[in-house]
Image: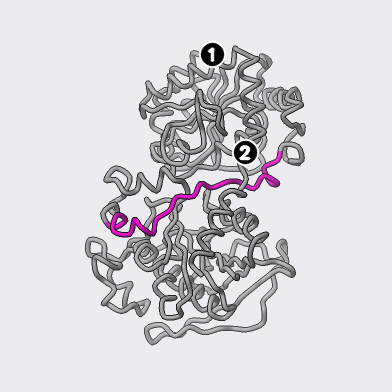
Amino acid sequence: MKVLFASSEIYPYSKSGGLGDVAHSLPLALKKRCRMVSITPLYRFIDRKKFNLHSLGTTYTLQIAEKTYTYELFQAKGSDTLFVYNDILCETEALYGYDNDALRFGLFSYMIAAVAERINADIVHLNDWHTALAALLLKPAAIKTVFSIHNLAYQGIFNKKTLRKLAIDKRYFTMEGLEFYGKVNFLKAGIAYSNIITTVSPTYAKEILTDQFGCGLDGFLKKHEARLKGILNGIDTLFFNPEKDRTIGVNFDAVHLEKKAENKRQYYRTLGIEENDKPLFIFIGRLVEQKGISVMMEMLKNLSKELLEFVILGEGEKETEKKLLKLSKKYQNIHYIQGYDEALSHQLYASADFLLMPSLFEPCGLNQMIAARYGTVPIVHSTGGLKDSVFEQIEKCIQGIVFDDFSKEGCLGAVMRALVLYRNKKTYQSMVKFDMECDVSFKRSAKAYMKIYRELL
């Protein structure tokens, strides 16, 4: 069985969030069970020399709406990842957010379909709206498609003129197809025309059928519910491995938690803090409402009065960044680090006692799994994949602190419970050890995807 796995981002080449991580980790787990080939754009910012990427030597053409587009395929020796280069798609400083994104990722979908036929793929696994049109384009080829929704909030909605530019027949511009309030919705193509639809957790698969979380597509998804399955993500446990992670100060495992404590001492020294026994709370993520940023900011004044340190690493809306910079200067124990740094995130996981994830909604979430791997207890809002992966007072992986009420009071109450837990050293250490021994890999997920693949064939 040969599977073509298509994603607009794959770590370490390109990444804006969890999609990049999953597009790296899931194919690694699947390649042990079938022939996996990944495909992604070769953006201009990807270092070709660093990754040893070379052209496969042929320029391919696409005839779309009386226009000719060309693209090349690149690959590193021995790699299973194909990179497509087309100047319209790839000559950008960032991944998304351009006026021609409809054309860019429409072209990418055409390239995915062409490559799938060229390599005789049995199944094409598509991810999010950037690849969704390929489900429609592949129907004449009778190649089976799986479409994974990583975050329904991002749908790829564009002007109706997009249909003509991409030579999509207007008969598909219906409520049952691509039409969405008079515009074209790329994500709907993946839902309507794929053989199987998946989301990244079982609870999120149920949530998106509701008005609250359906983002305007709950009715459409209900019509296709029979083809919808929720499969919880995992992480690459070889990459996120505190025993061998070279980015952290001191390596450690579940048996040697005193070495984790040394990471915290080292990090506290960088903050100029001498009182090492104060618990360290961290938040790592995008500063957007989905991540519960407003609730978190509302309680910073309360946290400033507690015996704790709180480090926030992330970037997002400029006004939010400005407020956090101001508050971190005002409150001595609140520390905001603007931007994102992969190595620093590892150091924070290795140093922290608690990770805060107060998400309004969370399709899956990976941070709680990374935190568990590094012995950092997650504090989460009970939603989506967080509800499926973090448990309180139930001996299931992962153990953490869970709150149901999405509010300042609900989140603050969870933090107060964390402080009580931290003072009970024996219980806290037992929870940390339990979490570090949890299997948060993609092993179980890969088995579930393989079952889907086999059923399609």
Callout 1: SS: helix
Q: Front-most of 61 and 192?
A: 192
Above or below, comparing residue 124 to residue 359 in the picture: below
Residue at position x 51%, y 70% from top?
A: 457
The mark total stands at 2
Report the span colored magenta: 220-241
Say what amino acid the circle numbered 2 marks. Answer: Ser
Residue at position x 47%, y 25% from top?
A: 327
Give me the disc on residue 313: none
Give me the disc on residue 345: 2
Disc nearer the start of the sequence (2/1): 2
Residue 367 appears in the rendering: yes
How far apart, in angstroms, are the residues tagged by discs 2 and 1?
26 Å
Location of residue 241 in the rendering, given as x and y in whole percent from the top left corner: 70, 40
Location of residue 212 in the rendering, given as x and y in whole percent from the top left corner: 29, 42
Say what amino acid the circle numbered 1 marks. Answer: Val
Location of residue 341 in the rendering, given as x and y in whole percent from the top left corner: 61, 43
Report the mark closest to the observer, 2 or 1: 1
Location of residue 201 in the rendering, given as x and y in whole percent from the top left corner: 46, 46
* Residue 224 colored in magenta in the image: yes
Q: Front-most of 28 and 151?
A: 28
The quarter of the picture where residue 354 lies is top right
The quarter of the picture where residue 158 lies is bottom left
Callout 2: SS: helix
Q: Residues within 10 Å of mark 2 (few under 14, many from 20)?
A: some
Q: Front-most of 192 and 49?
A: 192
Identify residue for label 1: 420
Residue at position x 32%, y 63% from top?
A: 185
Residue at position x 53%, y 49% from top?
A: 18
* Residue 24 colored in magenta in the image: no
Above or below, comparing residue 392 to residue 24 in the picture: above
State left or right for residue 313 relative to residue 382.
right
